Image (spheres, rainbow, N blue to C red):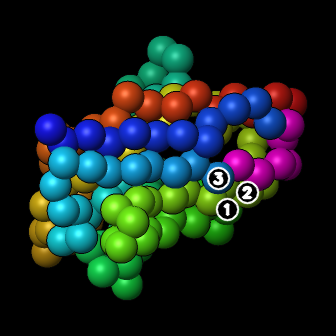
Amino acid sequence: QVQLAESGGGLVQAGGSLRLSCAASGRTFSKDVMAWFRQAPGKEREFVAAISGSGATTTYADSVQGRFTISRDNAKNTVALQMSSLKPEDTAVYYCASGPLRPIFEVRDQAYDYWGQGTQVTVSS
């Protein structure tokens, strides 16, 4: 059974940092694109960041560029999202997702096959 399990969410003050982790199991994800999405209350789920299978290539939403860093450890089947300089508008449920490698990074959630249950991140002002 394929599972993605996020952890590391919590409450943090604006300007602070959090590190989210996603542990994958049930199959080998080393060739998959791994991504993070988020969904704030009353809003649609939005793309945050993605990383290629090898970890050599990454892409970010403009809203988090320069503040968030995505990384992966294929030996451990994990992907992480280091979040710094957090803002109240970063408050959302954060989801880990995996999908097949494509010529370009996909930002549409429909392009990803497996999803975690999400972890809440709350940034207070």
Which is the main secondary structure of the residues drawn in magenta?
Answer: loop
Dot 2 corresponds to which residue?
Answer: 84
Residue drawn at (34%, 72%) of the image: 74
Q: Give above or below for 64 relative to 92.
A: below
Position in image of residue 45 (x %, y %):
38, 32
Residue beneath the point at 18% across and 42% down: 2
| Image coords of residue 51 (percent x, y) | 36, 68
- Label 1 packing within 10 angstroms: few (<14), some (14-19), many (20+): some
Q: Callout 1, which amino acid? A: Arg
**Label number found at residue 19:** 3
The disc at residue 67 is 1
- Closer to the chain start, of discs 2 and 3, is 3
Please state if 84 lies on the left or on the right of 101 as rendered. right
Q: On screen, 102 above or below 17?
A: below
- The mark nearer the N terminus, 2 or 1, is 1
For the N terminus, give its image quadrant.
Answer: top left
In front of the other: 108 or 76: 76
Residue 21 in the image: above or below residue 11:
below
How far apart marks 2 and 3 lie (CA) works out to 9 Å
Tag 3: amino acid: Arg
Label 3 crowd bin: few (<14), some (14–19), many (20+), radius 10 Å = some
Q: Which residues are magenta?
A: 13-18
Are the residues flagged by discs 2 and 1 in contact, CB closer than 8 Å?
Answer: yes
Q: Give left or right: position of 107 versus 23.
A: left
Q: Position of residue 35 (x, y in %)?
A: 36, 55
Q: Secondary structure at mark 2?
A: loop
Give the image quarter of residue 76: bottom left
